[in-house]
Amino acid sequence: MAPNVTTVEEITDSLHQGLDLAKLGKEQGRYLVYPDKKASYPELEPFEHKDRGLRGDPKKASIYDNATKIFDVTPHIGTEIHGIQLSQLTETQKDDLALLVAERGVLVFRDQDINVDQGLEFGKSFGPLHVHSTFGHPPGYPEVHVVYYDENSVEREYLDATTQTEQWHNDVSYEEQPPSVTLLKMTLVPPTGGDTMFASSYAAYDRLSPSMQKFLEGLQAKHSAQRQFDEANAQNHVIRRTHVESIHPVIRTHPVTGWKALYVQPEFTTSIVGLSKHESDAILQLLFNHISAGYDFQVRLKWEVWDNRTTFHNPIFDYLDVAPRHGWRVTPQAEKPYFDPNSKSKKQADREARAARKQ
């Protein structure tokens, strides 16, 4: 189904109308709207970010004491939580959630009643909400990123021309201040397939040799939105902002945990600053292969909250000939990525914590 196009006046009307996105996705398919003028969106402004996870309880008691069931899905990434509704979190629970997701990378909450307006309020608790430069969105909801794919999706040509290993990414890492805690609510899922794979960028760093870790620390890489801009131009969609790329550290430090994480991926990272093209391409391909082959620090899930700073993710398009998949995402922005040379790896922090408990 071809996307609808609306006027700039409609697109900039941020009065949320209580849309039922689950119903829209089921009945209308790809119901997105697009602006007809670039001026409908301003450039993103820099801001100071202080992660609320810094206020979290190390025991995360407000989460653990109120969940009916909670368990780690794999040793390195993913925790599943039952019995808590994201629509009803207290401020203390949001602090503890921010700390828990910083540590575990991905949280899965089952049987959620949260609607899109509540999702926006949830997202605002963690930072200014991102509006995508090229993608459409529901009428009146520019901050909502819709996930809708079926057998007729215009993106299918690109998906058919690439391998699944090329689609690992951190969302919009080309922004100066990329996202942090991110909410994805699925409303329509195929009977089989349509999962998302996540990989821990903490563990990805830990799995590198000490010599490679030392080499990468302090390097910077270019992250580019050019492919998404080219796709928008090909589909005659307005590109809302001029910003195309940012330079971020190859190894970044999480502001809450203080742990080191690998921060390059094949979707948006195009080169390493200061290296020749030959050297940059070789190092990046090595790191991309390292991520895609890291089966011991990956997890495959449906329905989740994740930290875009310390996880890579990869939607699995194995369902396009089976049934549609629909959901929506709310994406708060956070700090500009940085590297603290005094930060620790997660492996080192875990080792020190175990030693402290034995004393």
Image: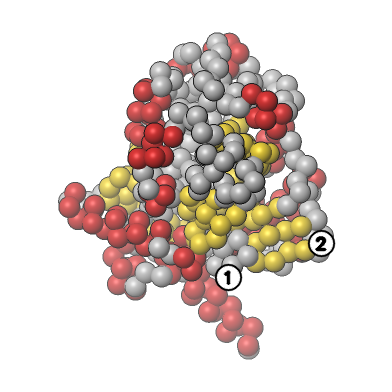
Q: Which residue is mark 1?
A: 75
Farthest front residue in view = 321
Label 2, secondary structure: give it.
loop
Q: How many marks?
A: 2
Give the quarter of the image for residue 332. top right
Question: Is 29 rendered above or below residue 175?
Answer: above
**Residue at left offset 70%, top offset 32%:** 22
Q: Is residue 111 visible?
A: yes
Q: Which residue is mark 2?
A: 68
Residue 141 in the image, given as x and y percentages of width and height: 63, 25
Question: Is 304 rendered above or below residue 41?
Answer: below
Report the colour scheme: secondary structure
Q: Is residue 342 visible?
A: no
343 relative position to 72: left or right: left
The label on residue 88 is: none
Residue 226 in the image, given as x and y percentages of width and height: 34, 33
Which amino acid, by three-letter code, is at mark 1?
A: Pro
**Residue at left offset 53%, top offset 73%:** 349
For the C terminus, give its image quadrant: bottom right
161 or 165: nearer the viewer:
161
Residue 101 in the image, given as x and y percentages of width and height: 62, 57
**Residue at left offset 57%, top offset 49%:** 193
Farthest bottom residue in view = 359
Classed neighbour count for the residue bearing mark 1: other residues with Cα under 10 Å, few (<14), some (14–19), many (≥20): few
**Residue at left offset 49%, top offset 23%:** 42
Label 1, secondary structure: give it.
loop
Classed neighbour count for the residue bearing mark 2: other residues with Cα under 10 Å, few (<14), some (14–19), many (≥20): few
For the N terminus, give its image quadrant: top right
